[in-house]
């Protein structure tokens, strides 16, 4: 069910985006009075809207070809009549024109947009309900606790390395400690996707995972470098991982 809701959400986003565009790409076959404007900057001498981009078929003009109605053409009843004239294929010469002013009356797909927003909201509530409203399942780690644990482990390792008596011992300690971290806190956090989305939404989830992914990469690089005997590179990555985990913790709130 959650997968189905996810697909519906993406469909709603697509329909909503397309519908929003039609707010400024308006049909040419509406009542001419709907094309009037109170803005002197966006209307012509007769008080009708000006088009924001050229429209119509290419026609000869000053020795070259150009759209029949150039940018800035005023949408008078005569111009609209010519644009909306039905052709042999049953379609108007110009279906839509781009204008620079919003009007509820000219927005042809407004109810599609409203329907998409309503359905998107309902699907979001449905996903939240299926995810337990952000509650952590029994036996699972809380994402905040996982990040706090990862931060504490990496910071402790960073602080303890200078006290270890040899480079070989340092490398062995890094491999052992970071290997355990990868299997515990990092693995547990990666499994909290649904909880994070329920608590923070898709936007917040993306911001959190962006910070976490950077920290996780540093841990993996530190482990890999230590396994290859590159102590300096490993320590550098451990140093960089600490502030990244701190940032992830901050974004979790």
Image (tube, helix red, strand yellow):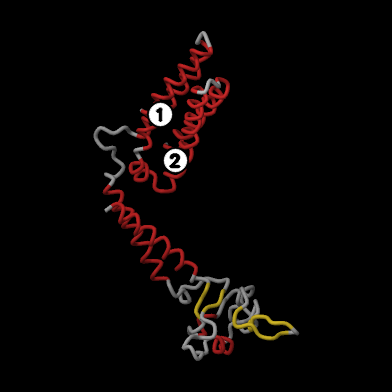
Whether residue 111 sits left or right of residue 78 in the image: it is left
Is 188 situated above or below 18? above
Q: What residue is pinned by disc 2? A: 209
Which residue in the rendered view is the most extreme toward the front? 228
Say whether residue 193 is left or right of residue 169: left
Q: Look at the numbered disc 1 and give the secondary structure of its residue.
A: helix
- The numbered mark, 1 or 2, whose residue comes first in the sequence reads 1
Q: Distance between the residues labelled 1 and 2?
A: 16 Å
In the orientation shown, which residue stands out farthest toward the left? 138
Label annotation for residue 182: 1
Disc 2 element: helix
Name the mark nearer the viewer: 1 or 2: 1
Percent coordinates x, y for residue 124 in the rendering = 33, 53
What residue is at 33 percent from the left and 44 percent from the top?
194
Compared with residue 8, is residue 220 higher up or lower down, i.e. above or below? above
Q: Say if mark 1 contacts mark 2, CB within 8 Å.
A: no
């Amino acid at each position: 069910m959650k997968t189905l809701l996810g697909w519906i959400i993406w469909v709603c986003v697509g329909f909503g985006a397309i519908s929003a565009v039609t707010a400024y790409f308006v049909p040419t076959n509406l009542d001419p009075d709907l094309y009037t404007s109170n803005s002197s900057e966006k209307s012509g001498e007769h008080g009708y809207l000006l088009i924001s981009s050229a429209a119509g078929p290419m026609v000869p003009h000053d020795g070259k070809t150009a759209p029949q109605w150039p940018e800035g053409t005023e949408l008078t009843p005569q111009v609209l009549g010519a644009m909306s004239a039905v052709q042999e294929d049953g379609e108007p010469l110009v279906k839509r024109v781009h204008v620079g002013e919003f009007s509820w009356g000219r927005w042809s797909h407004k109810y599609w947009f409203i329907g998409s927003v309503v359905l998107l909201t309902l699907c979001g509530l449905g996903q939240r309900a299926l995810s337990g409203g952000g509650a952590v399942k029994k036996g699972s780690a809380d994402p905040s606790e996982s990040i706090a644990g990862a931060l504490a482990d990496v910071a402790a390792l960073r602080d303890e390395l200078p006290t270890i008596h040899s480079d070989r011992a340092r490398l062995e300690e890094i491999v052992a400690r970071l290997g355990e971290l990868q299997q515990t806190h990092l693995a547990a956090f990666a499994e909290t996707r649904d909880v994070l989305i329920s608590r923070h939404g898709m936007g917040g989830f993306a911001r959190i995972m962006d910070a976490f992914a950077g920290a996780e990469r540093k841990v993996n690089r530190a482990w890999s470098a230590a396994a290859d005997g590159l102590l300096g590179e490993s320590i550098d990555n451990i140093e960089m991982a600490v502030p990244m985990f701190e940032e992830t913790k901050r974004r979790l709130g």
